[in-house]
Amino acid sequence: MPTILVNHVYYSPLGHVLEAIQYAKRFHDANPGSEVHIALSDGSPWELCEGAPWVVGLYRVPVAEPGSYDLSVPEMPREWDYVVDNNLMRCEFEQADRMVERGERPEGHKPELGWEEEATLAYYARTDAELVVRRGRGLLFPELSLPEGLGYDPHARMRLEVPAEARAFARRYAHDGPKICVLPAGSGPAAQYPRPDSWAEILDALRGRFPGARFYLTGTRVPGRHRRLTTTRYDEVGLARILASGDDVVDCYDIGLWAQVALLEACDLLVSPHSGFSFLALCVGTPWLTISGGNWPEYFNNGVPFYSVLPDNPDYPYLGAYGHDYDGPTIPDMQPERLRARIPDLLEGAAFLLDPATTYEDALRQHQANIARAPIRRERMPTMPS
């Protein structure tokens, strides 16, 4: 029985955990009879692996807190048939240097090699030296490079198994009309997300188009055990502004991770800016309507309908070149007047995804059509597999 280690120790936000679980599913489906294991940062929401029965083993690597790592490989098997490394952190530092050299990124906007980066890179150096790999070693970045004999199914789709108690909790939010989950922000700077007043406008437009809808506002105000699992950068005044925008808005903040997954599963639609947390919707069968903008386009494909409300911005996507200024002004894509201009497209996207006849293949075709007419950097948009 071949053993495969998806060595996916990286930054701890939730989206990277889902990427690792998706890679594991693709290896699992392409290599019948294999055992797939995952290594993750111990600061990430690793418990999501509990909903992925194709993951046999989970190894939590202590790189997420200052001084938490040492010079030994964490407790895990030392011999594997295959090891596939997430080489992204190494690639990011190399890419940043090249972008500065080409003038695509200002000097001083290089990512910093802090304690978490040093710990992660040290971990990879140790596993390079200490793990015994019987059949071959591969890389996920800068492009997928796999050893001979290791299969990979890029079309494999995954569905997280939601615990029964979480589903029972979500039933308290039952509603006869459209159930729309709203995630107003992710864990990045507030400047990357719509302002509270913009959200109030968006919700008002949605309730005008879909009378009887109910909106479930969710996220995490402050990090708990996972220091990077925070899905609001608003203060309480801003969040209260969104919650007070209508009697049909329900406060579902801080209900717990699996309860939020169950809430997403019970809803008909998720509306949010680009966020790794939002990938959860596509892992439980709920369509995702994205208010696109900033550094990263949508790329997480899992066989579930989606719709990207693309910005009017010839520089989008920035692919990491937009600086993370936590105290800076709202980025162009999320400024109120630009968002207001996108509301008609947002409403069309919502109608498209709320139509039960819409398929994933329909969404792919619509996405390509949207890219073709949008004034964006098309050459930077990822290829969307079928």
Image (tube, grey):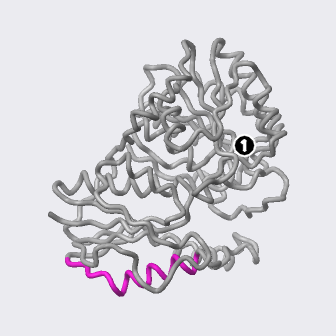
Image quarter of residue 302: top left
Q: In which quarter of the image is the C terminus?
A: top left
Residue at coordinates 69% horizontally, 69% vertically from top-left?
A: 104
Residue placed under numbered mark 1 in the picture: 312
Residue at coordinates 40% horizontally, 76% vertically from top-left?
A: 74
Q: Give the range drawn in magenta.
A: 117-134
Which structural element holds mark 1? loop
Q: Is residue 238 left or right of residue 103?
A: right
Q: Is residue 143 above or below residue 294?
A: below
Q: Is residue 107 left or right of residue 115?
A: right
Viewer-proximal residue, 123 or 164? 164
Q: Is residue 134 left or right of residue 114?
A: left
Viewer-proximal residue, 170 or 136? 170
Q: In this view, does 96 lie to the left or right of 259?
A: right
Q: Quadrant of the N terminus?
A: bottom left
Residue 86, position as x, y percentages in the image: 43, 69
Provide the major secondary structure of the magenta segment: helix
Viewer-proximal residue, 44 or 314? 44
Residue 337, position as x, y percentages in the image: 83, 37
Residue 84, position as x, y percentages in the image: 34, 69
Residue 282, position as x, y percentages in the image: 46, 39
Q: In this view, does 386 lie above or below 171?
A: below
Classed neighbour count for the residue bearing mark 1: other residues with Cα under 10 Å, few (<14), some (14–19), many (≥20): some
Residue at coordinates 16% horizontally, 56% vertically from top-left?
A: 33
Q: In this view, does 245 lie above or below 61?
A: above
Q: In this view, does 40 lie above or below 212?
A: below
Viewer-proximal residue, 21 or 161? 161
- Is 103 magenta? The answer is no
